[in-house]
Image (cartoon, helix red, strand yellow):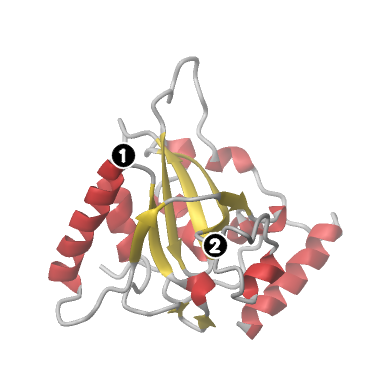
Amino acid sequence: MLSRLNHIRTALFSFATPAMAHAVDTSHYRATLSSGAHTQSEIATFAAGCFWGVEHIFLKEYPPSQNKGILKTSVGYTGGLEKAQNPTYREVCTGTTNHAEALRIEFDPSTIQYEELVEFFYRTHDPTALNRQGGDVGTQYRSAIFTHSPEQSKIAEDVTRKVHEEHFKGQTIVTEIEEAGQWYDAEEYHQLYLFKEPNGYQCPTHKKHW
């Protein structure tokens, strides 16, 4: 946690100082839309610890510029108390708003299936850790799948059973599966953070585990 806070302080300083900020070509992480394309795009929302690393590993695996199905992403806060609207990062870090740090993915279901995204979510963090990933501890770092339709809920449950049987037998998967609620984009300096700051903090659980 302290390591991450130090990286945030560094990031805020460098982003406030243009000469020090890393130049990022965001077009690589946003799909090129042709006329009439992607009109049937869907949304997937996952929480798996520090959202910097979650966004980073998904985009490294499925770069939008390579037309692998992910069109664009954003990191933000969801799953919080109804009264806690428009939370700031600092407020979420207190744990009092009950928001999770999460990744929102817009994807093309004709190119990639929701099932594959759910399985990749499980591959790239520890779903048996309750309210933590690595050294990051708190409800904001919980493992959760926020579904956007009854079909997504069923797929998430089916994939969870499959992953448990194949990779976590004898352990308990604590991932929450719940209907998606209000979403709030995180502050701009959090978006694509590890692409802007390649040496920035990354939770050690954000890697391919199989």
Q: Nearer the viewer, residue 132 or 151?
A: 151
How far apart marks 1 and 2 lie (CA) works out to 29 Å
Disc assigned to residue 112: 1
Task: Residue type at mark 2: give it.
Answer: Gly
Residue 186 vertical position relative to residue 50 in the rendered view, above or below: above
Residue 145 vertical position relative to residue 32 in the rendered view, above or below: below
Q: Residue furthest front?
A: 83
Residue count near mark 1 (Cα–Cα under 10 Å), binned few <14, some 14–19, many ≥20: some
Q: Give the mark count.
A: 2
Residue at x 76%, y 73% (from the top left corner): 9
Horizontally, residue 7 falls left or right of residue 138, namely: right
Q: To which quarter of the image does residue 85 belong?
A: bottom right
| Residue 45 at x, y percent in the picture | 43, 51
| Residue 206 at x, y percent in the picture | 43, 69
| Residue 28 at x, y percent in the picture | 55, 41
Q: Nearer the viewer, residue 206 or 171?
A: 171
Quadrant of the frame with the N terminus:
bottom right
Residue bearing the label numbered 2 = 80
Task: Residue type at mark 1: give it.
Answer: Ile
Q: Secondary structure at mark 1?
A: loop
Q: Secondary structure at mark 2?
A: loop
